[in-house]
Structures are given as structure tokens and as C-alpha cells.
Amino acid sequence: MLKDITLGQYYPGESPIHALDPRAKILLTIAYIAAVFVAQSYYGFLILLTLVLGAVILSSIPVGFFVKTLKPLRWIILFTFILNVFFVPGESVIFSWWIITITREALERAIFLAIRLVLLISGTSLLTLSTSPILLTDGIERLLSPLSRFRFPAHELAMMMTIALRFIPTLLEEAQKIMKAQLSRGADFESGNPVKRAKNLVPLLVPLFVSAFRRAEELALAMEARCYHGGEGRTRMRVLRYEHRDFIGFGVMAAFIAAIIVLGR
């Protein structure tokens, strides 16, 4: 159950996608998100799907592993679909019973937004799957560094974001261990109505929160023991520089966005 969640995980590799500068990948991800919202037709979504599939193939990430990124958010996608089916107004009625009315416009809108969410999640997942937490921190910090002259805590913000991403797989693994321990003691997390199942999660959530606070305290002590005092005066083993492949990535993304504007509106 929890082991299938790949959110925040890094998949090591030596592909062209992995080799891109982390700043370039962050900027390309932002451009991709903008393109998802710019696309207003299924032709635009087809162009974006081609881009995502091409990036997955180049990254050498197994398709099965990549598809798992959608599993934790499937209920959000389903909820969005149902919400639009029943509450978006329309004129062409397909189904009507009692107070339930489904129109063709609502169904089309629900499908459209569901596909948009799938593309948004799948495309942005490539950033964390192909970028290590350390490089992601450096990339975010370098992109936000111009704001430091206005006393914006660029390094601290980048560090917090990366630690949060890094601890998602750790906490999931810890939750899996606690769940197995509680199941061996007779706990039941699957049967019963939603209220009962929520109550049954208490033996899982309490130890998980305690473990999370303990790990946070241990991390703080470890950082203090290594004389960590923020980003001021710190040096880096790897200096980030844009390469030819990064500019090629920018060019490819610009071409896809242009195609969406021309064909996918």
C-alpha cells in the first residue's frame, strides 16, 4: 500500500535528463506547468503527453515506477472528476434522476480537468525523480539568490523545501514499519465504515508523529554538530554551470509551447 508511493523519491541514473542543470530543470518544470494551463484543447494535451513520454524515455526511468506517482493522488483526481460532473451547469442532458443531472458539457469538462491533473502530476514528478535532493537545494537557492539582497532567506527556504521532500520517502517507510507492527498486534486498517477506519488509524498516526519529531530533533542536532549556521559563507563542491544540453532543453520546451499555442488552443 504505502510502498507504492513514489512522491519525493529520487531515481538515480545517468540519462540526459539527470544530467541537466537543476536550475534548468526547475525552470523547465515551471514552463511545463504554464503550458498545461495554456492548453485549452485535447490537441494541446496530446502535445504535452508526447513531451512527457519523451522525457520519461530519455530519463531511463521505468514506466511502471513512473506511473506510481499518480497513485497517491488518484482520489483527488476522482473527486475533481465527480465534482465537475455533478456541479458544472450545461444544456445537453445525458442522464437525469431525482436531483442528479449530468450534462454533456459537465462530462466533457470533468474529463478535461482530470486529464489536466494527470499531465500536471506526471510532468512535475520528473523533477524530483531525476534530481537528487542536494542538487535540488542548490538549484532552488541559486534561482532565489537575487532576492537575498532584499534579505530574502533563499538558502533557508531551499533547505526547508528539500528536507521536506527528502523526508517523504523516509516517513512512508516508517509508516509501513509501524503498520506492519500494528497488524501483527491485531490492528485492522481496512474493514469498517470510513469513520471506523479513521479511528483505526490512531495507532498508526501517533507513533508516526512521535518518530517524525524525533527525526527532526536528531537532524537539528546533527546540523549543529557540523557547525551549520545557514548559507552565509558556505562553499559548494559542485559549481552549477549551464551547458549546451540545458539550452537544448530550453529550445525544445519553447518549441512545444509554440506548438501548443498554435495547435492546442
Image (cartoon, rainbow, N blue to C red):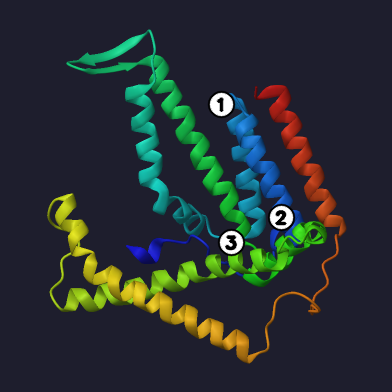
The amino acid type of the residue labelled 3 equals Leu
Left or right side of 192 for 89: right
The amino acid type of the residue labelled 1 equals Tyr
Contact between labelled residues 1 and 3, with CB atoms less than 8 Å apart: no
The amino acid type of the residue labelled 2 equals Lys
Residue 197's image quarter? bottom left
Which comes sooner in the sequence, label 3 or label 1?
1
Mark 3 to mark 1 CA distance (whole Å):
27 Å
Q: What residue is disc 1 on?
A: 42
| Residue at image point 68% right, 88% down | 227
Which sits in the foreground, 88 or 145?
Answer: 145
Left or right side of 257 for 93: left
Q: What residue is disc 3 on?
A: 129
Q: Is residue 42 above or below residue 78?
A: above
Dot 2: element: helix
Which comes sooner in the sequence, label 2 or label 1?
2
Dot 3: element: helix
Count residues near mark 3 (Cα–Cα under 10 Å), then give few for <14, some for 14-19, many for 20+.
many
Residue 148, x across and y down, in percent: 79, 61
Visible residue check, residue 35: yes
Quadrant of the image containing the N terminus: bottom left
Left or right side of 166 for 261: right
Residue 94, x across and y down, in percent: 30, 13
Q: Is residue 254 above or below residue 4?
A: above
Q: Is residue 224 above or below residue 122?
A: below
Q: What residue is disc 2 on?
A: 25
Quadrant of the image containing the C terminus: top right
Count residues near mark 2 (Cα–Cα under 10 Å), then give few for <14, some for 14-19, many for 20+.
many
Visible residue check, residue 132: no
